[in-house]
């Protein structure tokens, strides 16, 4: 049983050594623990620091590709390196390395494919009230969209077994955290959560730069994911609302047409016609998106098979 701890990094030379020191190298139930650092085109000495600390694997992007891309590249590399379990953690030592055994326990026991560490955000002293509220709201929305029960959806402290890592494909740019949970829920991957501890804050969060930035990016990410995973539903909601409004307005016009005078009601007739056309078109777009989404599922299945073949080729046919 091989565990690889992956750490996506951007300009983390200062705190990465502290994080690395905290990662246990011996864990019960696991034969070997290795570390993979993904350096997302850092301008500082992140990669050098990782090498000096004895990190086994380093991926270095020549330019900045974003956290989600770094996360995906990490999963891919871990699979090729023969990981049975992959743990993702942050480079700023937000999470306690000592909690890794707790995080992977349900996976070792065969009870889950993905475990998300629950920070219990309401109890984190350095989180502002607004940040706690936004995190809780985000978690609520993602729980509803994904049909899962994960209390802390933005937590970066997670464990994946090989099967889950093979199945997940991330297309978001801002963050992988929300998409992986929604994707897991939609694909019926067994996802669960365990309570974990957090360390004192070492530096300000770069992902949560401001409330506005966080809300904006989260809405963009969620809209994209939602229209990817449930296009028919979302477009039908929007389309039928507009269509119904146009229909009622049309009925109102007919009422005037037959029982009173239509004088002065032409504007509402035009609006009604526009709403009927637009609403219908949106429903049609939903249908097309649904077909595209079915295609995507098939493509993902092919990707899954290709990844398996790649893994076998890299590691030799026997493993
Ligand atoms: N690859 C990559 N990693 C990033 C980027 N921004 C943040 N990270 C990493 O993501 C993790 C979490 O970032 P952080 O700023 O601590 O956000 P927090 O989770 O809100 O505290 C850390 O390991 C960062 O190094 C980025 O642009 N690219
Ligand atoms: Mg942090």
Image (cartoon, rainbow, N blue to C red):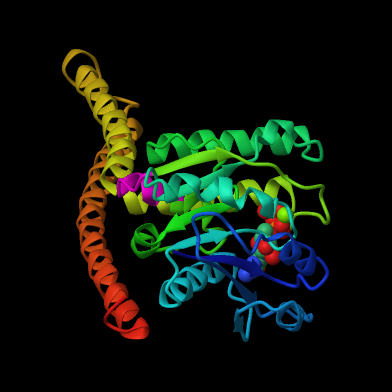
Highlighted magenta segment, given as a residue range: 181-190
Residue at the image point whose x is 67% and y is 69% from the top: 9
- The answer to whether 196 is drawn above or below residue 159 in the figure is above
Quadrant assignment for ligand 2: bottom right
- Residue 4 is one of the magenta-drawn residues: no
Residue at the image point whose x is 23% and y is 70% from the top: 302
In the displayed structure image, the side of residue 113 where residue 137 appears, left or right: right
Whole-percent x, y for residue 7 in the image: 62, 66
Q: Is residue 234 visible?
A: yes
Whole-percent x, y for residue 289 in the image: 26, 55
In the displayed structure image, the side of residue 291 where residue 208 appears, left or right: right
Query: Would you identify the image quadrant in which residue 211 lies?
Result: top right
Q: Nearer the viewer, residue 92 or 50?
A: 50
Q: Nearer the viewer, residue 104 or 224?
A: 104
Whole-percent x, y for residue 60 in the image: 61, 83
- The answer to whether 312 is drawn above or below residue 189 in the figure is below
Whole-percent x, y for residue 140 in the image: 52, 33
User: What kind of secondary structure does the magenta stretch mostly adopt?
Assistant: helix
Residue at the image point whose x is 65% and y is 34% from the top: 120
């Amino acid at each position: 049983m091989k565990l690889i701890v992956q750490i996506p990094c951007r300009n983390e030379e200062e705190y990465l050594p502290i994080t690395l020191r905290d990662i246990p190298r011996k864990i019960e139930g696991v034969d070997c623990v290795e570390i993979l650092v993904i350096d997302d085109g850092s301008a500082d000495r992140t990669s050098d620091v990782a090498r000096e600390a004895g990190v086994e694997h380093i991926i270095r992007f020549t330019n900045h590709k974003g956290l989600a891309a770094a996360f995906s590249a990490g999963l891919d590399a871990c699979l090729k390196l023969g990981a049975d379990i992959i743990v993702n953690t942050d480079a700023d030592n937000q999470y306690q390395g000592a909690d890794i055994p707790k995080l992977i326990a349900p996976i070792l026991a065969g009870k889950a494919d993905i475990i998300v560490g629950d920070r219990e955000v309401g109890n984190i002293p350095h989180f502002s009230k607004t940040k706690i509220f936004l995190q809780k709201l985000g978690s609520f929305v993602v729980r509803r969209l994904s049909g899962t029960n994960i209390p802390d959806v933005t937590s970066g402290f997670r464990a994946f077994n090989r099967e889950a890592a093979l199945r997940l494909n991330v297309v978001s740019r801002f963050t992988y955290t929300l998409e992986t949970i929604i994707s897991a829920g939609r694909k019926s991957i067994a996802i669960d959560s365990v309570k974990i501890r957090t360390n004192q804050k070492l530096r300000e969060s770069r992902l949560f730069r401001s409330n506005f930035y966080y809300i904006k990016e989260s809405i963009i990410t969620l809209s994209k994911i939602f229209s990817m995973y449930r296009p028919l539903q979302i477009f039908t909601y929007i389309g039928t609302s507009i269509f119904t409004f146009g229909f009622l307005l049309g009925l109102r016009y007919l009422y005037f047409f037959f029982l009173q005078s239509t004088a002065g009601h032409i504007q509402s007739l035009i609006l009604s016609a526009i709403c009927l056309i637009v609403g219908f078109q949106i429903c049609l777009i939903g249908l097309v998106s649904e077909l595209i989404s079915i295609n995507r599922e098939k493509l993902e299945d092919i990707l899954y098979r290709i990844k398996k073949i790649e893994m076998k080729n890299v590691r030799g046919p026997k493993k």
